[in-house]
Amino acid sequence: MAHAPENTLASIRKAATLGVRWVEFDVALTKDHHPVLFHDETLDRTVGVTGRLADTELADIMHLDAGAWFDLEFQGQTVPTLEETVTALADLGLGANIEIKPATGLEQETGRVVAERVIDLWPESLPAPLFSSFSEAALSAAYQRAPLIARAYLVHRPDAKMWRVCRDLACEGLHVEDRFVTRKLSIRRTHGAWPFAPTL
């Protein structure tokens, strides 16, 4: 996202030219339940219109410019669907950390739909993806639909709940901001105790 507009095919292609082998992107649902790459619940920051992604149908989303806000060089970039993204990943040979980014109230539905689409779309030529999410409900729904796809729980700040979520959802990873990695929450200590993590 430092080199190209976030959650666009341009950013994924740029990552490949920089030698990156895995990429991370956010997936949310449109009003008609199509999974697309999008970070915010609202549309204004990256596509310049008022409204919520969850209240907008895919046909209307596809006409919006998702690149000009970043730089005019990227004008005309659209909001990619998950299907378009997987095709690009296959062409570029990139693995993916798929962050499930549900709108408020759509946590379980988003996790379920994203998991089902990934099962349908994912090519054998790519390494298996990783699902991640700040939403326990979304990650749980993805786990139920696609238990063989690895999961990671995201947290803004470490707390006691995160260990329970990691155990309950059989997570293979815990994603936490680097500023919180301390002696109490060290990578070595956590790996050594996984999945029975130490007390904070």
Image (cartoon, rainbow, N blue to C red):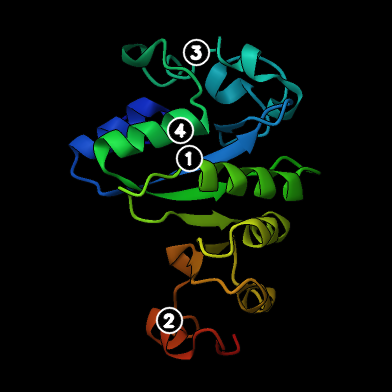
Question: x and y percent of residue 171 in the render?
Answer: 55, 71
The x and y percentages for residue 58 are 64, 19
In this view, 26 is above or below 74: below
The reply to whether the C-beta atoms of the residues labelled 3 and 4 are less than 8 Å apart is no
* 11 in relation to 118, above or below: above
180 left or right of 123?
right
Report if residue 38 is visible in the image: yes
Residue drawn at 57 percent across, 41 percent down: 117
> Which numbered mark, 4 or 1, is in the foreground of this view?
1
For the C terminus, the image quarter is bottom right
Label annotation for residue 186: 2
Mark 4 residue element:
loop
Q: CA distance from mark 4 to mark 1?
A: 18 Å
Look at mark 4 in the image and give the residue it sits on.
Answer: 7
Q: CA distance from mark 3 to mark 1?
A: 25 Å
Measure the C-alpha gap from mark 3 to mark 2: 42 Å
Mark nearer the N terminus (2 vs 4): 4
Q: Secondary structure at mark 1?
A: helix
Looking at the image, tell me whether mark 3 or mark 4 is earlier in sequence order: 4
Residue that numbered label 3 is attached to:
65
Q: Is residue 150 above or below residue 119?
A: below
Q: According to the image, label 1 marks what residue?
A: 121
| Residue type at numbered disc 4 | Asn
Residue at figure coordinates x 26%, y 43% from the top left: 93
Q: Separation of disc 2 and disc 1 at Cα? A: 36 Å
Q: Residues within 10 Å of mark 1 (few under 14, many from 20)?
A: some
Percent across and percent down for residue 91 are 27, 34
Left or right, 195 with reference to 145: left
